[in-house]
Amino acid sequence: MTRMSNSTHEAIRQVNGLSRRNFLKAASGLAVAASVGTSLLGASRAFASMPEGIKVMSQGEYAVMARLMAVTLPTAGTSLIPTSQIPVMQTLDAALLATMEPHILEGLKGGIQYFNEGPKASFGKTFVELSDDQAKRFCDAWGDSDEVPHRALAVGLKKLIGLSYWANPPTWAPLGYDGPVTDRWGIKSLGNAPMPKQ
Amino acid sequence: MAKTIPTNTMPAHGLKVTQASDINDGDIHLDVDAVVIGSGAGGAISAYELAKAGKKVVVLEAGRYVPSEKFTEMMAVSMDAMYADHGGQSNSAGDIAVLQGTCVGGSTVVNAALCFRTPDYYLDLWARDYGLTNLTPEVLLPYFEKVEANLSIETNKSYETSAGAELLRTGMKKLSLPDSSAKRNIRDCVMTGFCFAGCKSDRKQSMLVTYLPWAAAYGAEIYADTRATRILAKNGKASGVEAQVVDPDTKEIKASVRINAPIVVAAAGPIQTPLLLQRSNLANSSGQVGKNFACHPTLSITGMFDDNVDNFHGATHSLYMDKYTMPEEGGYLLLDAVQDPTEASFQAEPGTGEPYMAYMSRYRNAVRLITLIHDQNVGEVNWNNGAKEIKYFVDDADFEIMKAGLKTNARILFAAGANKLHIPSSQPLSIDSENDIDSVIGGLKNEPARYRYTSFHPQGTCRMGADPAKTVVSPTGETHDVHNLYVVDASLLPTSIGYNPSETVYALAHYINDHINRVHS
């Protein structure tokens, strides 16, 4: 069993527990202008440009999550909205990570780093350095790993990325989902129930 | 001669709530007859019954006040604003999302409104094993009838269904399994499918539109954004509560609150109530506070159909199958549920990248069926370095029950016309034929972080019972150790009950408050 720090265990616990969350309110309106920073997780040709408004993730953490987004949410050849048109990473950062308790966030950051270093054993590279095909195979391998932390991170980090994309209403139309209806259907509120007789 | 308690005019809509934004004074001192911690099922009913009896009542709710006109009908936004930990509450293994409402009205605002009376089986079990001989079916019957009348709890009308539920119903009929229509606390459902995000048109009879405004009409004051930090006791009797008003956006403490009250009702839910008692060093001579946690773990199988089903509007839950729900029969319950894209996005693992996006592209073709198990009370809730910890792992025996439930679940989906099933596991796992059900599901192993569990029903952390050495709360709802300190939420349940526990909590709340009012008349 791979030895892991307590903070990494905490990251696994939290990241896998994160559930259906929409961070639209915080993500909306954030700029997506690019700014290239320096690596915190080691040299990588794959480090993505980090948009303005990313305040919680470090450059290195952003690179890992952006790479995961790219391999998890491919839209080529589909009617789905490309991730370049959806503030996925801003949603993740500004509304999800920014609301975490500090000790949980610290653990999550450890988990992202651990995930990035995971492929070194099998591929000789960090996650951000893998090709698309390698990155997908790595994610699937960890999802079916005998190691609990591997499974937890593979599920949890992909879940965060997925939620940060699908929580944005523009992603719904290609699915045929029409979203909120009460106002559109003109449904009136019944208000408070009358006082009971007993 | 009966005392006549005057009522204020009840607004047609909304609720008078003191929020953090209303607070300017850094210290609040109140002297009342009763302080109620929590505004969900147990807290709201307590507030109403105590205020109606003429007591001066204050309700403290840690969550926000979100009036229904501000409900967004966007599941993830609602999770952020109205659920515990913004929807991120989980067990320590991280593989069970433990969902609870944290807002004025509590979980009743965001539940699916399903109501079941407590099965006699469990009342008998509780009498036999926990000395709750007072909670007989005959004693509780009028309480069930009362809440059913007050909350408009009725069997779904024939049109209160969903496209997915109707498909599943055909599957059940083909297999000669009994299909049952749910009872819900809803008036004139318009079937938006947004029960979990809060009912924007106030059809769901949550505490937000029933017992809380009724309590307020009798003079109860409600504080939102106000987290109880300590229950106070003197000479073995409850004496009040300390709390903090916290700005939900900035986390700034707006006021320290001290409430002196001879009656304290802890109704913060089965996670927060034991944590508060532990922090207060009260009511734990048995060592059982926080122990015996159960949560009705659920797993959903997603079936893919050839045609578009559009299973996202309609009654959130309308169909269930409980042929195998009693422990001797199997111990699992099957429930349908609509789902929005964010919910669908993590229900299955088809494979990273293109397989996942192909699965999501067929969202309109997807129908899920939930398996909920009656679980053993093997978990516990504690503080760990200043943070709450829910230690719970699915018991091996319970996992076998889950597998049995998943097999029935899968058979129903295939019988309903599904052509492929996704098992909610960490690795890609699907079933393409009914012939493969037993081999695939039979081969599942009980491993942490392997499955995508959700729990909607935490319970059992302050067990009710006659023996002070083994339980926390007496048969009348008062803690064994501290007089006039009552627990009124799902933490009371000595065992899990295999069905949605809300109506059990409603009935127990009325029962306990009848006792409080008799003792403190």
Image (cartoon, grey):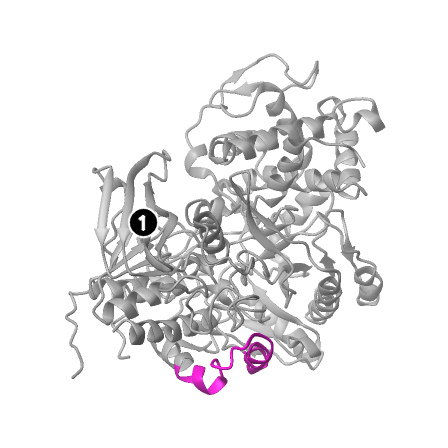
Q: Position of residue B100 (x, y in %)?
A: 48, 54
- B86 over B446 or under it: above or below: above
Which portion, as a residue range, is magenta? B119-142
- B57 over B387 or under it: above or below: below
Q: Nearer the viewer, residue B504 or B170?
A: B504
Residue at the spot 57% in from the left edge and 43% down from the top edge: A18
Magenta region's main secondary structure? Answer: helix
Quadrant (top left/top right/bottom left/bottom right) for the N terminus of chain B:
bottom left
Q: Nearer the viewer, residue B428 or A102?
A: A102
State which quadrant residue B327 falls in. Answer: bottom right
- A161 over B299 or under it: above or below: above
State which quadrant residue B508 falls in. Answer: bottom left
Amino acid type assigned to the residue bearing label 1 in the image: Ala
Q: Residue furthest front?
A: B235
Quadrant (top left/top right/bottom left/bottom right) for the C terminus of chain B:
bottom left
Residue at the spot 45% in from the left edge and 69% down from the top edge: B505
How dense is the environment of label 1, judged by Cα within 10 Å: few (below 14), some, or many (20 and up)?
many
Q: Nearer the viewer, residue A88 or B245?
A: B245
Q: Nearer the viewer, residue B200 or B135?
A: B135
Q: Position of residue B307 (x, y in %)?
A: 64, 61
Residue at the spot 71% in from the left edge and 40% down from the top edge: B354
Element under disc 1? loop
Q: Which residue is mark 1?
A: B224
Q: Position of residue B54 (x, y in %)?
A: 20, 69
B485 relative position to B218: left or right:
right
B336 relative position to A191: left or right:
right
Whether B75 is among the magenta residues is no
Chain designation of label 1:
B
- B78 over B148 or under it: above or below: above
Residue at the spot 28% in from the left edge and 47% down from the top edge: B258
